[in-house]
Image (spheres, grey):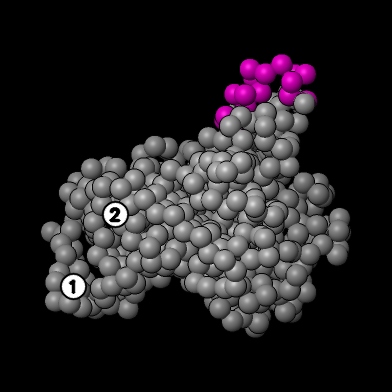
Amino acid sequence: MAGARVAAELHARGEDLKVTVLGAEPHPAYNRIMLSTLLTGKIGESDVELAEVAGRGVDLRTGVTVSAIDRAAGLVRTDDGDRIPYDHLVLATGSQAVVPALPGLDPRQLPERVVPFRTLDDCRRILALAGAARRALVLGGGLLGLEAARGLALRGLDVGVVHRVPYLMDRQLDPAAGAMLAGTLANLGVTTHLAVEPTAVHADAAGVRLELSEGRSLDADLLVLACGVRPDTALAAAAGLAVERGVLVDDRLRTSDPHISAIGDCAQHDGTLTGLVAPAWAQARVVAQVVTGQDPLARYRPRPAVTRLKAAGIDLAAMGDPTGGPGEELTFADPARGTYAWLRIHDERLAAAILLGDNPAVGTVIQLFDRGHPVPTDRRALLLGRAVGGAVAAPAASPALMPDAAVVCQCNSVSKGALVRCWRDGARTVDAVVAATRAGTGCGGCRDAVAGIVDWLSRTDPVEVGR
């Protein structure tokens, strides 16, 4: 995804620029974030394809692995013996799925019924196995693991999630939210096994058995590995570039070699790895500005990240660090309805938040967090999603009441005003607006909101739109 975006950004700024894209996977670029939706069967493979590079005069070579970087000669060597020179090289090597060190799991040759969930080919294998399966296990209770579990459950499988930590999504949630999320999943047909260590895997043509530290074992027809990812830095390290957890980059995304940049999952900026689509695309824009000379002093400035769980029947948004920090904390829980809200406010700004279940204030909370605006005097409106004691904090009931500056697509930083301008410029369908603005092409979580705004625009008098 990051490689496709930077190629498009480069070409858009320099039509005479020769851009070569080398990808080890046999497919053109696709949206990894949407693979979990593909798993549910709600979309097809054509819906995850990215058209960033298509028709833009970019030399795209798929199924080609770069085996070495010759920095002295300014060229890369490929596994098919080619030598390709460069003036500037951008590393967008992404990350590899982590395979846990367990007896029965060899990362070089996994059993047929054990599949990581990372690539399009992984997704194809999972779907092929799921077609004849009754039971599935997912190892890992993070964001990706839960999306995979829910997708398989929607296909009618009996699904269990095994997670080493006592509560789900421990990087984004607190224990109370994690416990309530487990209850929501149980109602949707997903069983969770928490605070247990897997000790071994036994897999053959008949099925998979996962041994647990407490002496139990779980049987299934399919085991999906969702144990996190590790930045793919092997190529950079072999070339002598500075590497820690990721490839070290500065504010202009340059590595220790000024002729080489790194973006996306493989890049480590200011001690931080991202793994999210919005930072990768922001980095692609900065690299293009610097390399083409459009803005040689452009700097990458990370924005606060908002995590959304894309799973049918679950509405979850988490932002900021839930593990601690200064400020006042507010909590509301309704276990019967599966609703949970937690906020941490510092200096009258929203520092962190968790919203699970039906909470009408989720749009307002995300906007306050993203833009750093002061919170309302009566904080209860943010927890309960309605005005309390005269405070008005609920999100706009109609797009007409949304400010133009409100960000609709977090991944691509597309505002409501940008969508309106696009519509006025002649885009009269959701697909046309998406193509022009890229809204909805990241995680896909805003697609319904974009469709709602386009529908509103199609029914509204142009004079009213301008108010």
Residue drawn at (74%, 64%) of the image: 300
> Between residues 309 and 289, which one lies in front from this camera angle?
309
Identify the residue under disc 2: 183
Q: Is residue 389 left or right of residue 223?
A: right
Say what amino acid the circle numbered 1 marks: Glu
Residue at 73% x, 24% y: name it.
Answer: 465
Q: Position of residue 168 (x, y in %)?
A: 36, 63
Q: Is residue 395 magenta?
A: no
Rendering coords of residue 130 (x, y %): 25, 48
Q: For residue 442, say whether it is visible.
A: no
Q: Which residues are magenta?
A: 451-466
Q: Give the quarter of the image for residue 222.
A: bottom left
What residue would you read off at disc 1? 211
Instruction: Say what secondary structure mark 1 lies in.
Output: strand
Q: Is residue 11 above or below residue 452?
A: below
Label tally: 2
What percent of the width, then of the height, locates residue 25? 49, 57
User: Which of 362 and 247 lies nearest the eye of the viewer?
Assistant: 362
| Residue at 14 percent of width and 72 percent of height | 216
Residue 438 circle label? none
Quadrant in the picture for residue 210: bottom left
Q: Which of the pair 279/60 is nearer the observer?
A: 279
Disc 1 versus disc 2: distance between alpha carbons?
24 Å
Specify whether residue 457 is painted magenta.
Answer: yes
Q: Is residue 381 left or right of residue 420?
A: left
In this rendering, the label closer to the viewer, 1 or 2: 2
